[in-house]
Image (cartoon, rainbow, N blue to C red):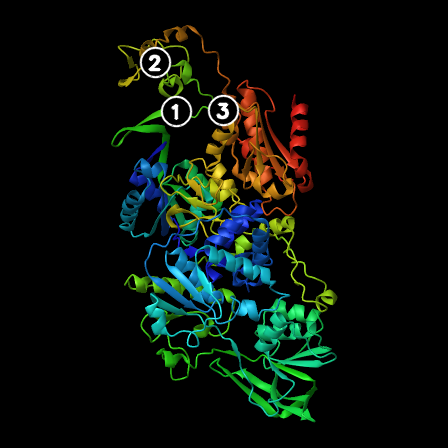
C-alpha cells in the first residue's frame, strides 16, 4: 500500500488538506450529497471556501500537465449548493477544560470548530459586533455574499461553539479574568485588522483613505464615494484589487491601480486582476509613491518614481527607485492598500510578550506564545495571506492546544504529495477543455454589489469534475498474486505498468489514470483498485439479483448527472464500464438475469477512450460463451447512448428489451 | 512446463570457439525451474568457459520469450559477440528475432513438456498436439506416453504392464485401463477414437492462434 501520508497534489497543496479528489469523484458521479459530506469532513468553512478560496489546489492539479487544471473551487461550490450532507450530531464535550479563542476570522473559527470536535467547550470572543473577521468586514460583498459567512458560522455554533461578539481582549477582559472563568487555554487569532500607511508628503488629510476602513465602510455601512471622483489605489495585492473594484461600485468615475511590482511580480491573484481589468480598472505597474500633491488642501496629483527593483538579491522586499524618473497621476481620492498590520500593541500589558520587532512572538512548532497557556494562529503570526492558509494555522493551533491540555508533546507532520506525471503518460491523456466559470457581465458588475461569480450549473460542474485524473486512486499491484504475465503492461492505454529490474512488474500507482481495464483483464486477480465502487461490484450484483429481477443493468456512474433523476433503482452504477468484466456479466446470468445490459455513453469528452471497446469485447465474449453453453443468444447487450439520451434511459431500456424479445 | 537440459560441454565449447565475448543468458521461468537456465547454471557455464580464456557476461531475464523482459538485457546483448542462451528453444528463437544482428547459440536442448518426477528426474506428459482427448483415456495421454502414439489400446508389445521399448517404461494403455477401471469408465474403451485430423498439430506448418475476445477493435 502506498503511504497514506502521500496525497494527491491537490489535497497536498490545500493548506487544510481537503480530499478534493474525493469530492470531485462524488460530483463527477452525480452524488452531490456525498461530495458535500466529504467537503465537511475537513473544511469548517465550506461555503466561504467554495466562494472565495484562493484554491492553491488548482495550481498543483496534474490535469495542468496535459491541458488546464481542474476548476476545483467552482466544483466545490456546486457540491455545497446542490448537496445535503448527512447531519452530524454536535459532539458531546468530553473534556472538562474550556478554551477561549480570541478573534473569529478564518483561523479562530477553524480552531473553535476543531476544538469543539475534539470535545472541548469553546468560546470565541470577537471584538466587533459581527463574527467572521476579515470575511465579514473586509472581503467585498460582490465576492462573498454574507449569507455564505452566516451559514458557516451557524454550523460552527451548532457544534456548541459559543461566539460572543463585542468582547475584546484587554478592553473587556484580561487573561486573569479568563482564567478565573475556567478557561485553561487561550488562542489568539487576532488577524491583521489595521491598514499600513505610506509615510510620504501629502498623505495626511482629506481624500486619502486606508483600504480596510474603506472596505468596511462600504460593506457594512453602505458608504459611497462622492460622485465623479477619480480614484487612485496604491498597492498590488488582493486587498488593493478589492479596494479598486469596490471603489468602482461605490461611485468612482475612474479607478487607477498603481503598484511597485512589475506585471510579472504583481501579487494579486491573476483572476482578480483579469476581472478588475474587465471592469475598466487600469493597472499601472512598477511605480513607487513619492508624494501626494494637494491643491487647496485637496488631493490633486499622485507623484510616483519608477521602480528599479522590488526585491533585493536575497529576494527580500526592499524596493529601490529611479528617483529622477517620475510621473504624475491625477486623481481626487487615494486609497492606500499597501499592507496590513496586527493590532497588538497592548498585548504586553496583558503579559503576552512581543518580540524585538514588535511582533507577537510564538514558537512555530508548538504555536505557543511567550505566555504560558496562550497560543496564537492565523495572520497575526503568519502575515497576510489567504483565508485557507489562516484556517490551516487555526487547525494546527487547535491540535497544539489539545496536546497542551493533555500534557502531551505536540508534534505535527505535514504529508507529502505524489510527484508529477511522467511525460509518456501525459501524452496519452485525453485533452478536455476546462469549463469556464460563468461571471456576471462586467458592465452589470460595476453598477451593483451583486455577486460576480455565478457558479457552474450542476451539469457543467459534474462535467468539469469528470476531468479529474484520479491521481493515485487507481490500480495497485498485489505482488504476492502477480504471475508476471504482462497483460497489464499490454492493455494499459497509458503505459502505466512497466517492467523493472529482474522482470518485476510495477504498476505505477502515482501514474495510474484509474480506467480499470487492467483490473478486468488481469488473469491472476493480482490487481486491486483504490477507487470506491470497483472491488464491490460482485457484491452489488449479488444484492441486486437477490430481489429476483429478470434484467440487470449496469450504467456508467459518470452519466448519473445526465440521467436527470430518471429512475435507476436496481441498476448498478459503475465508475466507467471498463471496470465490468466477463465474470461480472456471467455472474449476473448465473444469479438469474435473463438479460444483462451495459449502458455507456458515446461522449467525445470522456477521458477514457478505449473502455467502451473493451466493454464490447467482453459483451461479445459473454454472449459467445452463453450461446456455446446452450443458454441463449444475445443475452448481454451494450447500449451506447449519447449524453442527452440518458434522461430517457428507462424508456430506451424497455424498447431495447422489446426488440430483444 | 517446458523441460530442457544443458548441451554437453564439448558441443558448447565447439560452438563458442569462434567468439571471444560471450553472454550467457539465462531464463528464470521454465528452464530456471528445471535447473537448466537459472542464475546458478548460468554462473557454472560462464565459469567453465572463462577457464577457456573467454570473456564472459552473465545475465538472467525473467523470461526469454517476452520482449519486455528481454529488454532488460539489451545493452549486455549488444555489447557481446554472441548470446549463449540457456532458455528453451522458444526463448532462443525470440532473442534471435529481437536482435537480428546477433548470433544466438543454444546452450540447452529443449526436451519436452513434462514434470519433475523427483529431484532431477523429468518425464514427458504432453506433446502439445492441439486437440486434447484425455477425457476419453482416464486423464492420461496416449499420444505423449505411448511409444507408438496409439489411440485405441495397446500394441502387442505390451507385456506385464511394460512397454517393449524398455522394462523401465510402463505401458500407458495398461495405466489407462487401470485408471478407467477405478473410475468405473471401462465402457469408454468400447468407443473407438476415430482417425485423427492432425491439422491442429503441425501438419499445416508453424502454429499460431488468436484470441478474438482480446482483440480490441479500433474504431
Task: Report how far apart the C-alphas of labels 3 and 2 lie in the structure.
Answer: 39 Å
Using the image, name the chain to which the residue with label 3 belongs: A
Asked which quadrant contains residue A448, the reply is: bottom right
Q: Give the secondary structure at mark 1.
A: strand
Q: Are marks 2 and 1 in contact (CB under 8 Å)?
A: no
- Looking at the image, is A264 positioned above or below residue A445? below
Question: In the picture provided, is B35 more to the left or to the right than A159?
Answer: left
Q: Residue at x 32, y 28 (%)?
A: B115
Q: Nearer the viewer, residue A27 or A508?
A: A27
Contact? badges 3 and 1 (CB < 8 Å): no
Q: Is residue B192 visible?
A: yes
Looking at the rendered structure, the secondary structure element under dot 2 is: helix
Q: Residue A363: in sight, yes or no?
A: no
Q: Residue at x 53, y 35 (%)?
A: A580
Q: Chain of mark 1?
A: B
The quarter holding residue A124 reads: bottom left
Quickly name the residue at label 2.
B176
A461 to A200, vertically: above or below? above
Residue B40 picture location, percent across and down = 28, 44
Q: Which residue is mark 3?
A: A591
Are discs 2 and 1 both within one chain? yes
Total numbered badges shown on the rendered structure? 3
Identify the residue under disc 1. B126
Label 1: how many Cα within 10 Å (few below 14, some 14–19, many 20+): some
Give left or right: position of A253 versus B33: right
Give the number of the mark in front: 3 or 1.
Answer: 3
Rendered location of residue A130, percent (x, y): 53, 67
Amino acid at each position: 500500500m502506498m503511504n497514506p501520508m502521500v496525497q494527491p497534489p491537490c489535497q497536498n497543496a490545500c493548506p487544510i488538506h481537503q480530499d478534493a479528489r474525493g469530492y470531485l469523484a462524488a460530483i463527477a458521479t452525480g452524488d452531490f450529497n456525498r461530495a458535500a459530506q466529504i467537503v465537511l469532513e475537513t473544511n469548517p468553512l465550506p461555503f466561504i471556501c467554495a466562494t472565495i478560496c484562493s484554491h492553491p489546489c488548482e495550481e498543483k492539479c496534474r490535469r495542468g500537465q496535459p491541458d488546464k487544471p481542474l476548476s476545483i473551487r467552482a466544483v466545490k461550490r456546486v457540491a455545497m449548493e446542490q448537496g445535503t450532507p448527512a447531519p452530524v450530531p454536535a459532539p458531546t464535550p468530553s473534556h472538562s477544560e474550556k478554551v477561549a479563542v480570541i478573534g473569529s476570522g478564518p483561523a479562530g473559527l477553524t480552531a473553535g470548530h476543531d476544538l469543539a470536535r475534539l470535545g472541548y467547550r469553546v468560546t470565541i470572543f470577537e471584538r466587533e459586533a459581527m463574527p467572521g473577521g476579515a470575511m465579514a468586514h473586509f472581503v467585498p460583498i460582490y465576492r462573498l455574499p454574507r449569507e455564505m459567512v452566516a451559514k458557516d458560522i451557524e454550523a460552527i455554533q451548532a457544534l456548541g461553539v459559543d461566539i460572543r461578539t463585542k468582547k475584546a481582549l484587554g478592553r473587556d477582559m484580561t487573561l486573569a479574568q479568563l482564567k478565573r472563568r475556567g478557561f485553561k487555554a487561550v488562542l489568539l487569532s487576532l488577524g491583521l485588522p489595521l491598514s499600513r500607511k505610506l509615510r510620504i508628503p501629502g498623505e495626511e488629510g482629506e481624500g486619502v483613505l486606508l483600504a480596510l476602513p474603506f472596505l468596511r465602510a462600504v460593506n457594512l455601512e453602505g458608504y459611497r464615494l462622492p460622485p465623479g471622483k477619480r480614484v487612485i489605489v496604491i498597492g498590488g495585492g488582493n486587498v488593493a484589487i478589492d479596494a479598486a473594484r469596490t471603489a468602482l461600485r461605490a461611485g468612482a468615475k475612474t479607478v487607477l491601480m498603481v503598484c511597485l511590482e512589475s506585471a510579472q511580480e504583481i501579487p494579486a491573484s491573476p483572476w482578480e486582476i483579469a476581472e478588475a481589468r474587465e471592469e475598466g480598472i487600469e493597472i499601472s505597474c512598477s511605480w513607487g509613491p513619492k508624494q501626494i500633491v494637494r491643491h487647496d488642501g485637496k488631493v490633486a496629483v499622485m507623484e510616483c518614481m519608477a521602480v528599479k527593483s522590488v526585491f533585493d538579491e536575497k529576494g527580500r522586499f526592499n524596493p529601490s527607485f529611479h528617483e529622477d524618473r517620475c510621473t504624475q497621476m491625477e486623481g481626487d481620492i487615494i486609497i492606500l492598500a499597501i499592507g496590513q498590520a496586527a493590532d497588538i500593541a497592548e498585548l504586553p500589558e496583558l503579559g503576552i510578550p512581543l518580540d524585538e520587532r514588535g511582533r507577537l512572538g510564538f514558537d512555530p512548532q508548538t504555536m505557543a506564545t511567550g505566555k504560558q497557556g496562550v497560543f496564537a494562529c492565523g495572520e497575526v503570526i503568519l502575515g497576510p495571506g489567504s483565508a485557507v492558509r489562516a484556517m490551516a494555522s487555526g487547525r494546527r493551533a487547535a491540535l497544539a492546544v489539545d496536546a497542551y491540555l493533555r500534557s502531551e508533546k505536540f508534534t505535527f507532520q505535514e504529508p507529502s504529495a505524489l510527484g508529477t506525471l511522467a511525460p509518456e503518460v501525459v501524452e496519452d491523456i485525453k485533452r478536455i477543455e476546462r469549463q469556464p466559470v460563468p461571471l456576471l457581465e462586467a458592465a452589470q458588475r460595476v453598477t451593483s454589489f451583486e455577486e460576480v461569480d455565478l457558479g457552474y450549473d450542476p451539469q457543467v460542474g459534474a462535467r468539469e469534475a469528470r476531468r479529474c485524473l484520479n491521481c493515485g486512486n487507481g490500480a495497485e499491484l498485489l505482488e504476492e498474486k502477480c504471475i508476471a504475465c504482462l497483460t497489464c503492461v499490454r492493455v494499459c492505454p497509458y503505459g502505466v505498468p512497466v517492467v523493472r529490474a529482474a522482470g518485476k512488474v510495477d504498476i505505477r500507482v502515482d501514474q495510474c489514470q484509474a480506467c480499470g481495464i487492467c483490473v478486468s483483464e488481469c488473469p491472476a486477480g493480482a490487481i486491486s483498485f483504490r477507487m470506491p465502487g470497483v472491488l464491490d461490484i460482485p457484491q452489488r450484483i449479488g444484492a441486486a439479483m437477490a430481489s429476483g429481477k429478470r434484467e440487470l443493468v449496469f450504467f456508467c456512474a459518470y452519466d448519473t448527472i445526465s440521467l436527470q433523476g430518471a429512475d435507476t433503482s436496481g441498476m448498478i452504477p459503475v465508475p466507467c464500464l471498463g471496470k465490468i468484466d466477463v465474470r461480472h456479466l456471467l455472474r449476473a446470468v448465473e444469479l438469474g438475469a435473463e438479460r444483462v445490459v451495459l449502458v455507456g455513453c458515446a461522449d467525445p469528452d470522456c477521458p477514457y477512450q478505449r473502455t467502451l471497446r473493451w466493454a464490447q469485447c467482453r459483451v461479445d465474449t459473454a454472449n459467445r460463451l452463453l450461446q456455446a453453453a446452450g443458454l441463449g443468444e444475445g443475452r448481454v447487450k451494450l447500449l451506447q447512448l449519447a449524453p442527452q439520451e440518458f434522461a430517457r434511459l428507462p424508456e430506451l431500456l424497455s424498447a431495447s428489451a422489446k426488440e430483444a424479445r | 512446463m517446458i523441460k530442457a537440459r544443458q548441451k554437453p560441454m564439448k558441443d558448447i565449447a565447439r560452438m563458442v570457439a569462434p567468439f571471444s565475448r560471450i553472454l550467457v543468458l539465462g531464463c528464470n521461468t521454465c528452464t530456471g525451474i528445471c535447473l537448466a537456465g537459472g542464475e546458478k547454471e548460468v554462473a557454472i557455464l560462464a565459469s567453465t568457459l572463462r577457464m577457456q580464456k573467454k570473456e564472459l557476461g552473465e545475465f538472467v531475464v525473467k523470461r526469454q520469450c517476452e520482449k519486455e523482459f528481454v529488454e532488460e538485457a539489451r545493452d549486455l546483448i549488444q555489447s557481446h559477440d554472441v548470446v549463449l542462451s540457456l532458455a528453451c528453444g522458444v526463448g532462443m528463437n525470440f532473442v534471435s528475432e529481437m536482435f537480428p544482428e546477433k548470433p544466438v547459440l543454444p546452450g540447452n536442448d529443449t526436451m519436452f513438456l513434462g514434470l519433475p518426477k523427483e529431484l532431477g528426474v523429468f518425464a514427458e506428459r504432453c506433446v502439445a498436439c492441439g486437440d486434447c482427448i484425455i477425457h476419453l483415456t482416464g486423464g492420461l495421454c496416449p499420444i505423449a506416453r505411448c511409444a507408438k502414439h496409439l489411440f485405441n489400446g495397446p500394441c502387442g508389445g505390451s507385456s506385464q504392464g511394460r512397454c517393449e521399448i524398455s522394462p523401465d517404461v510402463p505401458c500407458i494403455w495398461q495405466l489407462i485401463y487401470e485408471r478407467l477401471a477405478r473410475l468405473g469408465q471401462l465402457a469408454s474403451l468400447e468407443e473407438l477414437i476415430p482417425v485423427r485430423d492432425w491439422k491442429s498439430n503441425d501438419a499445416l506448418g508453424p502454429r499460431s492462434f488468436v484470441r478474438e475476445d482480446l482483440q480490441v477493435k479500433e474504431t
